[in-house]
């Protein structure tokens, strides 16, 4: 997924969360609150696990897309965007996971 698409999805979520709940799924989730959004993230994560076990690659891709989308909704709920996560991933890019974990314990 490229940065432009993530930015576009974040922009769409920002617009839709302001819409009337009866006209927007994102708005419905936002109005239901954080617990409803978290429930969807967990539900979709479970579907990723099942799709992985099924071994159907297209099914797995579709379920991961659902997790990513609902995670973007969750970020938006907290006033964050995909760019915030991308910056964190960029910060970690040249750091070994072992070294990064060790730096937290020192």
Image (cartoon, rainbow, N blue to C red):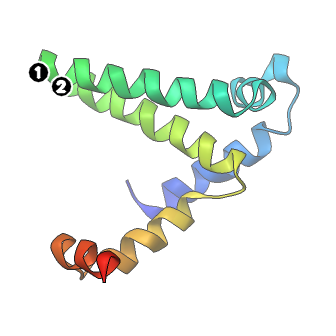
The residue carrying mark 2 is: 52
The residue at 71%/26% (across/down) is 29
91 versus 19 height, above or below: below
Instruction: Please indicate, yes or no, whether residue 56 appears anywhere in the rendered image.
Output: no
Characterize the local packing of mark 1: few (<14), some (14-19) or many (20 or more) Cα atoms within 10 angstroms. Answer: few
Residue 9 screen position, x and y as percent: 59, 48
Q: Residue at x 51, y 55 (%)?
A: 6
Residue 54 left/right relative to 12: left
Indicate the secondary structure of the residue bearing disc 2. helix
Q: Are marks 1 and 2 in contact (CB under 8 Å)?
A: yes
Give the labeled residue for mark 1.
55
Instruction: Name the residue located 31 percent from the left edge and 84 percent from the top edge.
Output: 106
In this picture, residue 105 sits left or right of residue 30: left
| Image: 99 above or below 76 | below
Q: Is residue 91 visible?
A: yes
Residue 34: image quadrant is top right
Q: Relative to residue 15, is residue 59 drawn left or right?
A: left
Position of residue 1 relative to residue 12, above or below, is below
User: Which residue is most to the left?
Assistant: 55
Q: How many marks?
A: 2
Could you classify mark 2 by the number of other residues whose Cα lies within 10 Å: few (under 14), some (14-19), or many (20 or more)? some
Q: Position of residue 94 (x, y in %)?
A: 24, 82
The image shows residue 66 at horizontal and vertical percentages of 44, 30
Tell me residue 42's x, y (percent).
Answer: 45, 27
């Amino acid at each position: 997924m490229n940065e432009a698409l993530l930015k576009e999805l974040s922009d769409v979520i920002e617009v839709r969360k302001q819409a009337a709940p009866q006209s927007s799924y994102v708005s419905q989730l936002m109005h239901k609150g954080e617990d409803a959004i978290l429930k969807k993230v967990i539900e979709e994560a479970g579907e990723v696990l099942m799709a992985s076990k099924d071994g159907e690659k297209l099914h797995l891709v579709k379920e991961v897309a659902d997790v990513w989308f609902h995670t973007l909704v969750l970020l938006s709920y907290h006033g964050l965007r995909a760019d915030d996560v991308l910056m964190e991933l960029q910060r970690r890019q040249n750091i070994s996971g072992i070294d990064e974990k060790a730096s937290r314990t020192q």
